[in-house]
Amino acid sequence: MTGAGQLSIADVTCSRGGRVLFEALNLTLIPGQAALVSGPNGSGKSSLLRLIAGLITPLRGHVQCEGEIALADESHALDPLSPLKKALTFWADIDSAPPERVDHALSAMAITHLADVPVRMLSTGQRKRATLARVIASGADIWLLDEPANGLDTASVALLVAAMSAHRALGGIIIVTSHQSLDVQDALLINLGAM
Amino acid sequence: MKAFLALISRDFRLTLKQGGAILPVVFFLLVATLYPFAVGPDGATLTRTGGGVLWVAALLAALLPVDRLIAPDVESGVMDQYVLRGISEEVIVLAKLAAHWLSFGPALIIATIPAAALLRIDYDTLLRLTLGLLVGTPGLAALGLMVSAITAGLRGAGALAGLLMLPLAVPLLIFGAGSLARDGSSAILLLGACSLLLCALTPFVAGAAIRALRD
């Protein structure tokens, strides 16, 4: 991570399947900042993250990102048959991350003891933690977290909050969507439902 | 480049782990075993028709893994993660093409030796068959990958893939079987041309199909 990531969204309108989800959204984040996106189901929270990630294109406006992006959404993107650590190492290798970063990510999400367990044997909550570990190990500047607290127990939510603060302390940027309350300090609040 | 090799190795190992490499070979040998039962044990008939049958078997064997080439990675979010890391769809498909061919091409070529024995194919024909498969299987792999990307995300993709792929494979079959004739050198060149064309087109066609899936 360089700590020099930057993200700006200018006048972005997102439309999916011919329906406009949100219009004229503006957002600028500098290192250390976080945004908490809220809104009812179908208000375009996930679409906003996919838009920032460059996976879909906005109807109008533009998104400018500097720095690497890591995305954690409902799909874990880990090979079901591989042991957890090996599955995480595959992505860490592509990201040219040193191996110890995977160990750090496993311990940050308290899943070190599951390192040799195949991904398909993990529970929903454990899989969610593994997804977050993938993001932590990536070393990306910008984290896009889609409902990261879904399926997590209280202790794991605390780990998530701690990992997010640590990332911001190093100059990282986070955009997190959540329909439940998540303790993100000094976050910019974006309510898509109110637009 | 490092990511490209990592992708090939991941896909190749995944196919081996899921048994995707053994299935086409078993199918291929099964056809070679069943064919003499159907047409009778007459050696001359088997020798004359065996090579062509093995080409049809190879074609159908290449069709078997088609529903698992692209769709699982799209569903599990792996494709999104690749794109997020700046790996283009074309490069992803090229890596998948290499891994897919490695997982069934060489095994199929080795399997022609026992299959040739079962069908009483003579040594010269076996050599031409092996050479033909070496040239033609990359084309079959490319075609399978292309069809797999186009049908990913559709219901009943497996059956549809067969309907889409088999007509497109006709040139490979014609030139492949044609190359078995004693003066089949021009057929093998045309087979190579078809194979190259498919390998060159597939990254772009399948890449566009994968991109379209995201919208």
Image (tube, coloured by chain):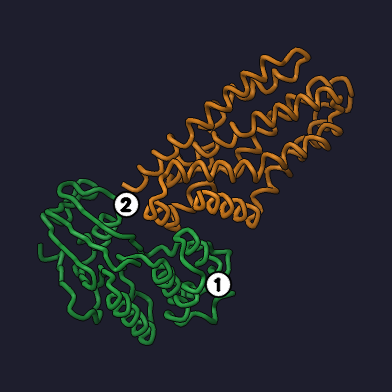
**Whether label 1 touches label 2, CB < 8 Å:** no
SS class, disc 1:
helix
Which residue is drawn at the image coordinates 75% and 27% (left, top)? Answer: B129
Q: Is residue B110 above or below residue A170?
A: above
Mark in front: 1 vs 2: 2
Q: Is residue B207 above or below residue A48?
A: above
Q: Residue B156, can we see it?
A: yes
Q: Amino acid at mark 2?
A: Leu
- Residue B97 placed where, x, y %? 55, 41
Q: Chain of mark 2?
A: A
Q: CA distance from mark 1 to mark 2?
A: 29 Å
Determine the colour of chain A: green
In the image, the chain rendered in orange is B
Q: Which residue is mark 1?
A: A121
Q: Is residue B22 above or below residue A40?
A: above
Seen as rendered, the residue at the extreme top is B183
Which residue is drawn at the image coordinates 52% and 66% (left, top)? Answer: A89
Query: In this view of the protein, which residue sits in the foreground, A55 or B147?
Result: A55
Which residue is drawn at the image coordinates 35% and 79% (left, top)? Answer: A163
- Residue A64 placed where, x, y %? 22, 54
Q: Is residue B27 left or right of residue A91?
A: right
Query: Which of the 4 image quadrants contains residue B122?
Result: top right
Q: Residue B160, can we see it?
A: no
Q: Which residue is mark 2?
A: A55
- Residue B187 placed where, x, y %? 66, 17
Q: Is residue A168 left or right of residue B144?
A: left
- Residue B146 placed where, x, y %? 49, 36
Query: In this view of the protein, which residue sits in the foreground, A44 or A79?
Result: A79
Q: Amino acid at mark 1?
A: Met
| Lower sequence index among marks 1 and 2 | 2
Query: Which of the 4 image quadrants contains residue B24?
Result: top right
